[in-house]
Image (cartoon, rainbow, N blue to C red):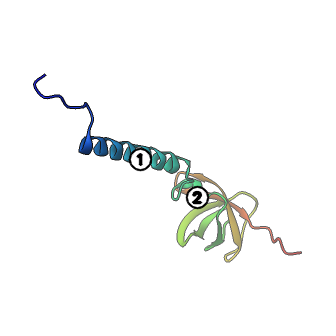
Amino acid sequence: MLVNMPDISGPLAILIGLGCVLLVISIIAVIRSQRRSPAAGRETLIGSVGTAHTALSPEGSVRVQGELWQAVANEGSLEPGTRVVVTGVEGLRLMVKRKEDTHV
């Protein structure tokens, strides 16, 4: 060789080091995002508490998370204003049951 230079020197070594650090940070961010629970979608509706907007005998509408949904009561009929819990989702229809009071 005409010029005798080390393979990795000065600015090149710094760039390679920064690239490795950015790669590790990116991998950690991807792993964390995959472990996070969903923030939207049908999974967030199940277990949500709402209010019967119309009578459910067994079909009607409920207000859950500020939105009006078509719903089917799992057990009997429910009056308007009754607190309900979402037990399932079928398409755009919620399956609900009466919310049990936990006051003792």
Q: Position of residue 64 (x, y in %)?
A: 59, 68
Q: Position of residue 15 (x, y in %)?
A: 28, 45
* Numbered disc total: 2
Identify the residue at the far right of this view.
104
Q: Position of residue 32 (x, y in %)?
A: 52, 50
From the image, state whether disc 2 or disc 1 is nearer to you.
1
- The answer to which of marks 2 and 1 sits earlier in the sequence is 1
Amino acid at dot 2:
Thr
Identify the residue at the far left of this view.
2
Q: Position of residue 77 (x, y in %)?
A: 73, 65
Amino acid at dot 1:
Ser
Q: Does residue 8 lie above or below 55 as drawn?
A: above
Determine the secondary structure under disc 1. Answer: helix
The residue shown at (74%, 66%) is 98
Q: Is residue 24 left or right of residue 46?
A: left
Question: In the picture, which quadrant includes the N terminus?
Answer: top left
Whether tag 2 and tag 1 are in contact, CB under 8 A, the answer is no
The residue shown at (38%, 42%) is 20
Question: In the picture, which quadrant includes the C terminus?
Answer: bottom right
Q: Does residue 44 lie above or below 25 as drawn?
A: below
Closest to the observer, 102 or 19:
19
Identify the residue at the far top of this view.
1
Closest to the observer, 94 or 102:
102
Determine the secondary structure under disc 2. Answer: helix
Q: Which mark is residue 78?
A: none
Closest to the observer, 87 or 54:
87
CA–CA distance between discs 2 and 1?
A: 27 Å
| Label 1: how many Cα within 10 Å (few below 14, some 14–19, many 20+) | few
| Label 2: how many Cα within 10 Å (few below 14, some 14–19, many 20+) | few
Q: Which residue is mark 2?
A: 44
Q: Which residue is mark 1?
A: 26
Q: Does residue 29 lie above or below 39 as drawn?
A: above
